[in-house]
Image (tube, rainbow, N blue to C red):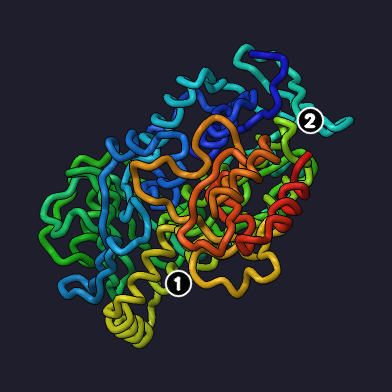
Amino acid sequence: MTDDTRILISGAGPVGLTMAIELTRYGVPIRIVDKAASRTDKSKALVIWSRTLELLDRAGLVRQFLDAGQTCHGTQFSNGPETIARVSFDSIDSPYPFALMIPQSETERILETHLKELGVAVERQVELTGFAERDGRVLSTILRPDDQNEVIETQWLVGCDGAHSAVRHGLGMSFEGSTQPSDWALADVEITGLKDPDRIAIFWHSDGILAVFPISDKRFRVIADLGPAGDDGHHADPTLDDVQALVDRRGPGGIVLSNPIWLAAFRINERKVRDYGRGRVFLAGDAAHIHSPAGGQGMNTGMQDAFNLSWKLAMVARGTCKPSLLESYSPERSAVGDVVLRNASRMTDAAVLRNPIAQAIRNKIAHFALDIPQVQHRIAQTLAEVEIAYLKSPLSVSAPGAESIKGGPAAGERWPPIKADVAPVGSGSVPGFTLVGEASVTESLARQFPALVVGTGTGPFEDVLWLVRPDGYVGLTARSDDVQAVRAYLEGVAM
């Protein structure tokens, strides 16, 4: 380990590993610790959505994920024997118009292997036991496998340590929310007899929901709600026979389960912190927000927390930008967390309706609404997280006159990737902005701000200048002749 470690990351799940890869790729010395002895061997989070794949592409990791996962192109809703509605993912505006089904164990394997190739190893069986800010630094105490304590001095600490986060507890932050008053069953099993096995199957039975998610050719995740939770504590984990009985009653018939890999009962928590950081300490992923698994947004949202924070930390750590840049992290990602939490809660509430009249109304609304292509497209875009935007961020600026520009993304919106085989904005080893517009203007500005502007490009409209952040979101839109607006923006973030 080097003595110039800038950032300590606590937690080596998908979020912590993503944070470590991004910071290391940008040349920032880090350490990453995890109290677990090894990576998870459970499937846990199953879905990687389009926007996350786009962001992973910046580090050249998409091919590894596509090779290890299975593409899923839609969802089908039924009441068992009859189809209620379908949603296709093929219309998602992305080079990756699908859900990639891949066990979390594989996601962690790919990420940790890549991090090791970058020269950083996860320090396992190492637990963060305390931390304090002092004189503009963070002093973190870790307990090593030999039962010896070590104090690490860094500029920042990032807690990616899950729902029971030691970092969140150390900050004294309230994890506001509730636990849903219902029990759920989960089973990772092999299945035969399922029609359309490459689609997510949602069965809205009068007894409750049954959902089947593809994992690989024969392996699937089955989730079912078990009704209101009792007062006698944790529900017993189901047996294979228990889950088979649920599938027989709620499914279309003919589905046979075998070879269980994981059987569990769980309850859904919906909780979130108000602020994603305090001083030099930040939270990301489940340490900051947990919610219903409906929509498969949890891991994706956490990894996107990491993508958002890492480039800001990198540019401040490298002395390129003012520390005030970091103040944008919490408002940007907290707003996204609120939306994801709300959407997941609504999907879950709709799925567990018990009143027969309410169920009938839900089914009819879904049948007619999801038959409209525009509605299907909007749902697919939302699930894929390509519509996430930072419109109210202090980093999103629309220069005077830019509001009249027609076409192209607005300030705060995602810069659309061109295609899968073209390096996206934010690739490479140096974090910085990409200036898109008329070549003579962009190249001149790039020469004036060589530490901040690392790339230029020609835009789709001649009368517009776009300044695109390293995470692929538009920071500034301006008229093509408003060079001063670009200068003011860059001078505002420059060290």
* Left or right: 480 in relation to 96: right
Residue plotted at (41% across, 34% down): 60
The reply to whether dot 2 and dot 1 touch (C-beta < 8 Å) is: no
Binning the other alpha carbons within 10 Å of mark 2 as few (below 14), some (14 to 19) or many (20 upward) gives many
Q: Which residue is mark 1?
A: 349
Residue plotted at (71% across, 58% down): 485
Nearer the observer, disc 2 or disc 1? 2
The quarter of the image holding the N terminus is top right
- Per the rendering, the mark at residue 138 is 2
The span from disc 2 to disc 1 (Cα, nearest Å) is 42 Å
Q: Indicate which disc, 2 or 1, sits on the residue closer to the N terminus.
A: 2
Amino acid type for the residue under numbered disc 2: Val
Q: Quadrant of residue 374?
A: bottom left
Q: Quadrant of residue 142?
A: top right
Residue plotted at (33% across, 51% down): 96
> Viewer-proximal residue, 18 or 456?
456
* Image vertical order of residue 139 relative to residue 234, above or below: above
Q: Quadrant of residue 156?
A: top right
Residue 418 in picture, x, y percent from top left = 39, 51
The quarter of the image holding the C terminus is top right
**Residue 305 visible in the current orientation:** no
Q: Assign a secondary structure to mark 1.
A: helix
